[in-house]
């Protein structure tokens, strides 16, 4: 049995209260952390990856999904299974509903929140292990050690950002409502992640995610179509080994504003560059092959996740072909 270290649990009923509780715990030297559904944090505590003396529980803060005219706003505390079946999400961000429906298995989706998914710690085969396992290997750069076993060096950590919802949120240019010590602010999700598996989130310590805003796409140029495809070994539970989101406005097979985001291959999910060249183009097989080639050239999976890296890279090509063919066909 894996035992957690002792900690105190404080319940917050609003984000303001959570922020205050976090400040108090920090002032007391308790090195606090927030816990929402706990589906990622609790395994990490059992593996003794983190050592907080106090947890601030966000589970009593209500979530919810609202249609606000030009955007759909999803509270950070909203459970993934609610997102997967919500009529507003299905109408305006169907790929997000699909991504949420593909996270782990039903039990985890009924506990896990969107906030926890967006702010999920990066993962690695050499890091998400028991303390005994990690100690036997001499630890690693991300926790207690000095060496990265994936890149074979002492400087870079390439642990993977492995959230299913994130590539879709990036493809749809979502914005994040945050609450920190300096008050509330909004930032684009594309500014959130950086290529550093040890410190991949560009937010302040103790800053809370309170909501995710998803813009409704302008449909005057065509019908909004999107997709999310996930590669994993066991469909019933596994994290993605590759997550591919696509979104664009379509008039028949003619596309505008095409976005493709590749996730679960390195610390920073990234949008594919060079897709502007296809604005106003009919997506036939020649264009789809050219885009698949672009994605292949820009996708460099790291071995921090299960699955041969060359296979995961090649699967990006397969998923682009399948996804764009389906989107072009409507
Ligand atoms: C067996 C297993 C399989 C899984 N498979 C998948 C998968 O296929 N795809 C996937 O995407 N995920 C997967 N997960 C990870 C996890 O279940 C989900 O990412 C889930 O959405 C995390 O949400 P949570 O509310 O449980 O987060 P928690 O575990 O409570 O928190 C995660 C992190 O986010 C922080 N946090 C949470 N909410 C906030 C907030 N509002 N403001 C500031 N910080 C916050 C916490 O401090 C913590 O650092 C899996 C987990 C397990 C155990
Ligand atoms: S990528 Fe390297 S440093 Fe980062 S968690 Fe994995 S082994 Fe550790």
Image (cartoon, helix red, strand yellow):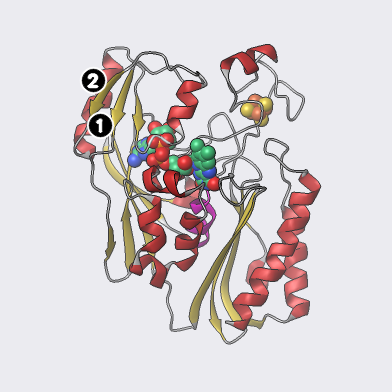
Decide if residue 75 is in sight here. yes
Q: Is residue 45 left or right of residue 124?
A: left
Q: Relative to residue 26, is residue 105 depicted above or below?
A: below
What secondary structure is the stretch in magenta mostly built from? helix
Residue topped by disc 1: 19
Residue at position x 67%, y 38% in the image = 305
- Quarter of the view holding residue 289: bottom right
Nearer to me, 99 or 238: 238
Taking the image in four quarters, ligand 2 sits in the one at top right
Task: Determine the residue located farthest toward the front in the rendered image.
Answer: 1
Q: Position of residue 248 (x, y in %)?
A: 54, 72
Residue stretch rendered in magenta on the structure: 163-171
Gap between marks 1 and 2, in whole Å? 9 Å
Asked if the stretch drawn in magenta spans residue 187, the answer is: no
Decide if residue 172 is in sight here. no
Residue at position x 71%, y 40% in the image = 302
Q: Relative to residue 101, is residue 198 depicted above or below?
A: above
Q: Relative to residue 193, is residue 325 depicted above or below?
A: below
- Quarter of the view holding residue 304: top right
Residue at position x 60%, y 52% in the image = 235
Badge 1 crowding class, 10 Å Cα cut-off, few under 14, some 14 to 19, many 20 or more, is: many
Task: Determine the residue located farthest toward the right in the rendered image.
Answer: 310
Q: Position of residue 110 (x, y in %)?
A: 38, 47
Q: Earlier in the sequence, mark 1 or mark 2?
A: 1
Q: Is residue 273 left or right of residue 202?
A: right
Q: Secondary structure at mark 2?
A: helix
Q: Position of residue 292 (x, y in %)?
A: 74, 65
Asked if the stretch drawn in magenta spans residue 170, the answer is: yes
Q: Relative to residue 223, is residue 97 depicted above or below?
A: above
Residue topped by disc 2: 24
* Quadrant the C terminus occupies: bottom right
């Amino acid at each position: 049995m894996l035992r957690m270290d002792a900690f105190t649990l404080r319940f917050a009923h609003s984000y303001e209260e959570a922020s205050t509780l976090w400040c108090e715990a920090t002032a007391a030297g308790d090195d606090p952390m927030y816990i929402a559904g706990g589906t990622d944090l609790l395994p990490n505590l059992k593996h003794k990856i983190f050592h907080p003396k106090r947890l601030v529980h966000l589970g009593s803060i209500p979530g919810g999904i609202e249609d606000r005219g030009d955007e759909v706003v999803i509270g950070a505390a909203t459970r993934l299974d609610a997102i997967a079946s919500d009529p507003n999400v299905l109408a305006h961000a169907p790929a997000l509903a699909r991504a949420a429906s593909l996270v782990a298995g039903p039990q985890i989706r009924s506990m896990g929140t969107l906030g926890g998914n967006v702010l999920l710690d990066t993962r690695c085969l050499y890091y998400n292990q028991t303390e005994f396992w990690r100690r036997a290997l001499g630890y690693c750069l991300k926790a207690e050690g000095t060496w990265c076993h994936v890149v074979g060096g002492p400087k870079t950590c390439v642990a993977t950002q492995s959230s299913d919802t994130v590539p879709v949120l990036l493809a749809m240019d979502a914005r994040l409502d945050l609450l920190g010590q300096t008050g509330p602010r909004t930032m684009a999700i594309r500014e959130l992640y950086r290529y550093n598996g040890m410190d991949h989130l560009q937010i302040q310590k103790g800053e809370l995610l309170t909501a995710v805003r998803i813009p409704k796409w302008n449909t005057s140029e065509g019908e909004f179509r999107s997709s999310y495809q996930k590669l994993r070994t066991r469909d019933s539970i596994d994290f993605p080994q590759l997550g591919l989101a696509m979104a664009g406005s379509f008039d028949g097979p003619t596309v505008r504003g095409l976005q493709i985001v590749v996730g679960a291959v390195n610390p920073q999910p990234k949008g594919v560059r060079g897709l502007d060249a296809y604005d106003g183009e009919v997506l036939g097989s020649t264009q789809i092959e050219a885009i698949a080639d672009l994605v292949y050239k820009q996708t460099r999976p790291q071995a921090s996740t299960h699955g041969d890296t060359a296979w995961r890279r090649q699967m990006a090509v397969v998923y682009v072909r399948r996804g764009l063919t389906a989107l072009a066909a409507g």
